[in-house]
């Protein structure tokens, strides 16, 4: 099962530590992991003013996974927090691009050769 992990952050237990709380997502971000992943990521969002999700190791993301990211973004905005997506894997970037969600997330997407 996919489980987010704090990415090399010695001060991750301090909710207002300087800089974003960085969480790496790995493996499949899909309907099978959705319930657990949603609860964990919402908990992580409450820990810091800025939550950065590292998507480098995401091997699959389906619409349930994208719904979680949209929920996190909306929740962050509503609560005056910030959600950032970074290090997009090709799979994650392609899903965001395919669904037209690049502007919604506001994060730069890597340009893949097959898109040009």
Image (cartoon, rainbow, N blue to C red):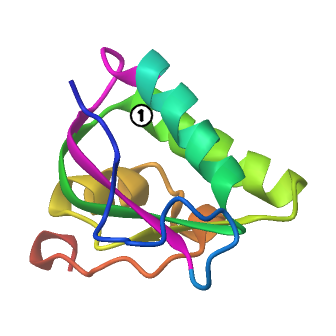
- Placement of 89 over or under 60, stated as above or below: below
Residue 20 appears left or right of 49: left
**Around disc 1, counting alpha carbons within 10 Å, would you say few (fewer than 14), some (14 to 19), or many (20 or more)?**
many
- Report the residue at 48% width, 72% height from top: 11
Q: Residue 31 at what x, y percent from top left?
A: 36, 18
Give, as a single range, the part of the protein colored magenta.
20-34
Q: Residue 63 at what x, y percent from top left?
A: 42, 30
- Placement of 36 over or under 6, stated as above or below: above
What residue is pinned by disc 1?
65
Q: Residue 47 at what x, y percent from top left?
A: 65, 54
Residue 15 is a magenta residue: no
Residues 77 and 51: in front is 51
SS under mark 1: helix
- Report the residue at 61% width, 85% height from top: 18
Residue 30 is a magenta residue: yes
Residue 106 appears left or right of 78: left
**Most common secondary structure along the magenta stretch:** strand
Tally of marks: 1
Q: Residue 105 at what x, y percent from top left?
A: 59, 65
Residue 55 appears left or right of 22: left
Q: Quadrant of residue 33?
A: top left
Residues 67 and 77: in front is 77
- Placement of 31 over or under 100, stated as above or below: above
Which image quarter is the N terminus in? top left
Which image quarter is the C terminus in? bottom left
- Report the residue at 87% width, 54% height from top: 79
- Placement of 26 over or under 24, stated as above or below: above
Residues 97 and 52: in front is 52
């Amino acid at each position: 099962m996919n489980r987010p992990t704090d990415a090399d952050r010695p001060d991750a237990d301090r909710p207002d530590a300087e800089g974003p709380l960085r969480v790496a997502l790995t493996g499949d971000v899909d309907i099978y992991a959705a319930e657990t992943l949603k609860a964990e990521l919402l908990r992580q969002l409450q820990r810091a003013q800025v939550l950065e999700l590292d998507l480098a190791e995401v091997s699959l993301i389906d619409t349930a996974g994208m719904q979680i990211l949209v929920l996190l973004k909306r929740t962050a905005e509503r609560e005056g927090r910030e959600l950032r997506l970074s290090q997009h894997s090709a799979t994650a970037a392609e899903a965001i691009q395919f669904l037209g969600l690049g502007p919604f997330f506001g994060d730069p997407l890597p340009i893949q050769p097959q898109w040009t």
